Each structure stands twice: as structure tokens, then as C-alpha cells.
Amino acid sequence: MNREDMLTKIETVYRGRATGDLSQFPDVLAPHAEFRFVGDGSIVMTFPGGRSSKPEEVAQELFDQLDMLDRRMESATVEEDRAAVHWRVVMRFKGGEPFELELFDLWEFGEDGRITKGSQFFDTAKVMDEMDDADMARSASDTREAVETAKSDAARVDSMDFGIGSR
């Protein structure tokens, strides 16, 4: 398999992860393909998709919880059935602020030309900080919404005529 074909298949995976459209995954992923995040296991397990090795599940969880706002391939090295890719991305956890992150992926391809394994290396401490910030922002937003709802409910109750003592 040549370099361009391999990089096109990797791009297909990233595009599906970014858009939520996983329909082309069977064309580029072997049926037994695996994906894993590399890093401290206790941290990786908390990351979206960190508990699964099935690329479709990982991609869906990432799509559900993260917006990939920008992605740029910095470099790629292809040798035999492997491709190593360095990315610079801008992402945002739902409810959080955008942040920049560098990723390094190692992809392996089978004899049929489809991806059999993907491993991703990233700054787990940075991701945890961003997850915490997004969680706090969502919590603050939820609290503001709850307060507004309570005020609205209280105003509605204050204005209701229950007919008490009005005989």
C-alpha cells in the first residue's frame, strides 16, 4: 500500500470522528480493528472513548463530547504497513473553551489495506485540565439555569390564585 492511500484512510477516520458520520469506517477499518489511547491508564479511562478499543465506539464518544474545531497534519512518516502522524488540533469539550493540543498517532494496516490498529499519544494532563474546566463551566451553566427556573416557578406560584378564603 502506498503512502497516499494510507493517509487518505487515516483522514477518513478523522473526518468521521469530527462529523459523527461513521458510514465510511467499514471501508477503511478491518473488522477486528482496535484503537487505544496511550498514557496513564487511570487518566485515559476517564477520557471520552477511553474505555473501548472499538474505533467506532471511540469515535462516537469523542464526537458526542468533543468538538474538533481545527486539525492540521504537521508530519507523517510511512514505512511498510505503518504510518506515524503528528497532528496539531484545536478542540473544545462541550461546554468548554477551545484549546490546542498536539497528537501523535501510530496506525497499522493489514494485508487488505485497511487499518487494523491505531494508537494515540497526547498530553493527558492538558486534556484532564480542559475536561475539568468544561465540567465546571457546565456545572455553572446548569446552576444558572436551575436558579432561573426556580425564580420563574416561584413567580408563577406567587401570581396564581388558589381561591383560598375567597368564598
Image: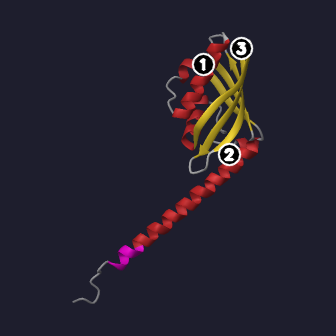
146 above or below 164?
A: above
Please report the bounds of the magenta region as a residue range.
Answer: 154-159
Label 3 Cα crowd, 10 Å radius (few <14 / some 14-19 / many 20+)? some
The N terminus sits in image quarter: top right
Q: Earlier in the sequence, mark 1 or mark 2?
A: 1
Residue 47 sits in which quadrant?
top right
Q: Is residue 166 left or right of residue 67?
A: left
Magenta-colored stretch includes residue 155: yes
Determine the secondary structure under disc 1. Answer: helix
Mark identifier at residue 46: 2
Give, as a three-letter code, the residue at label 1: Thr
Q: Which residue is mark 3?
A: 81
Name the magenta segment's main secondary structure: helix
Give, as a three-letter code, the residue at label 2: Thr
Determine the secondary structure under disc 3. Answer: loop
Residue 35 x/y as whole percent: 67, 29
- Is residue 82 or residue 73 the one in the foreground? 73
Residue 161 sits in which quadrant?
bottom left
Magenta-colored stretch includes residue 21: no
Mark identifier at residue 8: 1
Residue 160 x/y as whole percent: 31, 78
Give, as a three-letter code, the residue at label 3: Asp
Q: Earlier in the sequence, mark 1 or mark 3?
A: 1
Q: Are marks 1 and 2 in contact (CB under 8 Å)?
A: no
Estimate the spatial distance between the alpha carbons at disc 1 and disc 3, rounded to whole Å.
14 Å
Residue 71 x/y as whole percent: 62, 32
Could you tell me which residue is drawn at 39 percent across and 75 percent down?
Answer: 155
Residue 99 sits in which quadrant?
top right
